Image: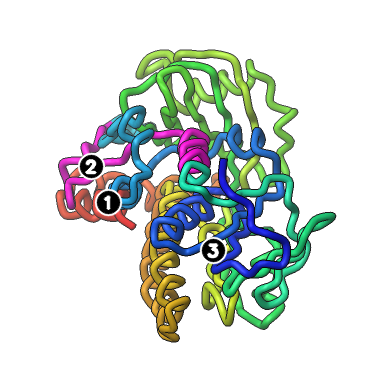
Amino acid sequence: MGKRFDPGAQVGVVIVGAGPAGLVLGNLLLDRGVDCVILERRGRAAVEGRARAGFLAAHSVRVLTEHGLGAGVSARGRAHGTCLFRSERGEFTLNYGRLGRREVHTVHPQQELVRDLIAEYLRRGGDLRFDAEVEQIDGGRVRVRGGEDVTGRYVAGCDGHRGVARAALAARGVRTARRDHGVSWLAVLAEAPPSMAAVGYALHERGFAGHMARTESVTRYYLQCPRGTDPADWSEDRVWAELALRLRTAEFGPLREGAVIDKAVVDLRSDVLQTPGAGRLWLAGDAAGLISPSAAKGANLAVLQAERLALALERALAGDADGLAGYAAECLPRVWRAHEFSHWMSGLLHGPAGDDAEARYGRELQYARLDSLRTSRAHQDFFAENYTGI
């Protein structure tokens, strides 16, 4: 187990949040000899059991491997380099691993990555406190509800989009650029083997449907749904019937069904803070910016930001005043590039509803984009580079 700093002692960095951003950051800081404490509001079982994203880009795998955090990914992750698109005009498969930079994704469920990162952080002697709900951040002092205050020379906010760290930075007048994509997904986790060899994207007049393998026995599905949908209204029979319709199983073959073990509605929204930090408070992951899940960028941005923030904090603690300014200058352009592609992907997958002239025009544009992706090598290279790139 990790060590615990004495009450009143000042540490180098207090990290708020034990998601991928906070755990990668904590491990990298320990690796650089920087003392840190991670505070997580939930219990360990909840943190390690939360099913989230599962696609790691090549850059993320490199970061994890280079810093001794990639054993689980190497042992259990599966390389994946194809995706397929279905519509009323047929199906085609894109082998993006042979296009662009010739990079692939590694499929590795986020909860498994989180478990590995927690175990390694504790093995390295890190101080990780579960059930430690932060209620206020004041300079370097972090107030824990019902517990001891923790003080650091810097605070790293990795506690998500609705966390205390983002609220503390917003209170300083940091502006946000945001967009509501006007789209919602019913996210379904099924205890069922994958039904396709590739990630599947289906365009349908009833809305988008997606198929994403997680493990050999668990598959993630998505169904576009109206804003305000209650997941409880979707029975297992209704879920599988709608997936079969939109994924066109009558034409391309049946799905391998199983028990639905989780359902949630995700509203596709994106935002980016004008700067990811100021003074002694700096953010990474969803705390610094929320990205829609349409291109599987969230966890990969978290790893990128954690890597760059660790280096910047190390420099700042050593007296380099430009270290943290460099973190913002380096990360923001890459964050915006990821958002641009995610926005493009959302436009490809979600056509307008209705049967008026403007809706018909929008859907024809959607199919024109898809046809260009099917036939143009230049378009395919663009897709591959941005789909896997961070």
**Disc 2 vs disc 3: which is toward the camera?**
3
- Horizontally, residue 65 falls left or right of residue 102, namely right
Q: Residues within 10 Å of mark 1 (few under 14, many from 20)?
A: many
Q: Compared to 214, does 155 lie above or below?
A: below
Q: Compared to 353, does 146 lie above or below?
A: below
Q: Residues within 10 Å of mark 3 (few under 14, many from 20)?
A: many
Does residue 5 appear anywhere in the picture? yes
| Mark closer to the chain start, 1 or 3 | 3
Position of the C terminus, as image quadrant, is bottom left
Tell which of 55 and 130 is nearer to you: 130
Q: Which range of residues does the magenta coloring cover?
A: 92-120
Residue at the right extreme?
146
What amino acid type should be assigned to the residue bearing mark 2? Tyr
| Mark closer to the chain start, 2 or 3 | 2
| Mark closer to the chain start, 1 or 2 | 2
Residue at horizontal 54%, vertical 69%?
A: 12
Q: Which residue lies under the disc numbered 1?
A: 383
Q: Position of residue 376 (x, y in %)?
A: 17, 49
Tell which of 252 and 291 is nearer to you: 291
- How far is disc 2 from disc 3 in space, using C-alphas? 27 Å
What number is the disc on residue 289? 3
Tell which of 297 and 321 is nearer to you: 321
What amino acid type should be assigned to the residue bearing mark 1? Phe
Position of the N terminus, as image quadrant, is top right
Tell which of 363 and 338 is nearer to you: 338
Q: Which residue lies under the disc numbered 2?
A: 96
Question: Secondary structure beneath disc 2?
Answer: helix
- How far is disc 1 from disc 2 in space, using C-alphas? 8 Å
- Horizontally, residue 334 falls left or right of residue 12, namely left
Question: Does the CB distance between marks 2 and 3 fall below 8 Å?
Answer: no
